[in-house]
Amino acid sequence: MDSASETNKLWQDRDVRFDVPLSHMKMRPGERLIDHLDSIEDTKGNNGERGRLMVTNLRIIWHSKIFPQINLSIGFSCIIDVTTRTAKSKLRGTTEALYILTRCNNTRFEFIFTNLVTGNPRLYTSVLAVMRAYETTKMYRDLKLRGALIANKTLRLLPLEEVYDKVNGVWNLSSDQGNLGTFYITNVRLVWHAEINETFNVSIPYIQMRAVKIRDSKFGTALVIESLKNAGGYVLGFRIDPVEKLNEVMKEIHSLYRVYSANPIFGVQYQVEDRLEPLDQVTVQYEEDDIEITDDNASSDAFVAYYADGNKEEDSEPVFCEQLGLAIEGIKEGFTLESLWEVTGI
């Protein structure tokens, strides 16, 4: 499972990437195209460039129509704010645009997209609706400790989840004494909870499993589950008696993991009203240029334009703020003091 899990590692919703190769723009297993708009300008970084914007269940993809190698991949997990503000577009002039503020690896990026089709609000409505659907389905994708997973000794099922097996008498080996509990093995994840205290539990989606193996421990033969580094890098041990039953459970988890990896369930569901074109008709096709780039710093220029406050060269003139009772730097047009506090407080 180790090599397969690293190959299938989920990055699409957890990263912001610039000018990615074609292979990174293709839908990964389980990723679904939800909406696409063909006349969208990247006003922040490629003002005047007409492009296509695609919304999937994991991310937002934009690419230039003329030069598809100029593109963006914005994972929903990185987005901290979505709103509309006035922007200056070379193709539409001063108009309402979609502002997306993100944070990735402790760096904030700002994206501005302008719909070049007048009177069409779908750019904002699709992005916002899918982002909300993504936020409410994190249990499909994130490892969760001590969550509200159990009600009346029964697993709270997710909308697309099915229980394949329930295993009683499973010891969690996280403490010296061990805790007796129950396994729920589903099509999406593995859940364990203690019999005495249902809030002592763990939910491990298959997408976050790095390895599942049997090892010797001070408690005897144990089932060991390792999570990926971005899921905390946990090493969780469980004992099931007899050993034959332990082997059966491991084989069942391996089997369901393989089925899940072929077609992961990420839980994000949203349907646009307009009929979408088939995926193969909106897939980007282009050949790599047969050139060699010798400037090592050239690749870093792609994201410079998207830094939040990246165009700021000097401080604005100080102004008196009645709310704070002191002088502050002038706030940029389209922002308020309250919105700045919301961003810094996240």
Image (tube, rainbow, N blue to C red):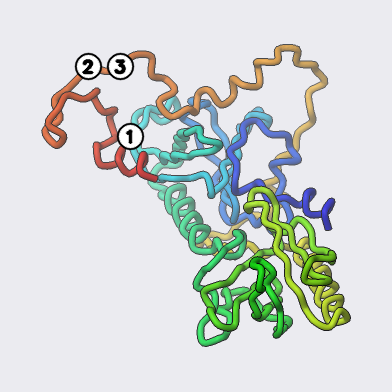
Task: Answer few, some or many: residues within 10 Å of disc 2's Cα (few below 14, many 20 plus, some between 14 and 19).
Answer: few
Position in image of residue 228 (x %, y %): 70, 52
Position in image of residue 211 (x %, y %): 79, 58
Query: How far, Cα to Cα, is label 1 from label 2?
Result: 22 Å
On the picture, is 243 further left or further right than 234? Answer: right
In the rendered view, tell whether residue 286 sits above or below residue 172.
above
On the picture, is 18 further left or further right than 255? Answer: left
Q: Is residue 261 visible?
A: yes
SS class, disc 2: loop
Residue at point 54% right, 74% down? 149
Task: Answer few, some or many: residues within 10 Å of disc 3's Cα (few below 14, many 20 plus, some between 14 and 19).
Answer: few
SS class, disc 1: strand
On the picture, is 169 further left or further right than 201? Answer: right
Please tell me whether mark 3 or mark 1 is closer to you in this view.
3
Q: Quadrant of residue 174?
A: bottom right
Q: Amino acid at mark 2?
A: Glu
| Residue bearing mark 3 | 315
Quadrant location of the C terminus in the rendered image: top left
Quadrant location of the N terminus in the rendered image: bottom right
Q: Earlier in the sequence, mark 3 or mark 1?
A: 1
Task: Answer few, some or many: residues within 10 Å of disc 1's Cα (few below 14, many 20 plus, some between 14 and 19).
Answer: some
- Tag shown at residue 86: 1
- Tag shown at residue 317: 2
The furthest residue to the bottom: 152
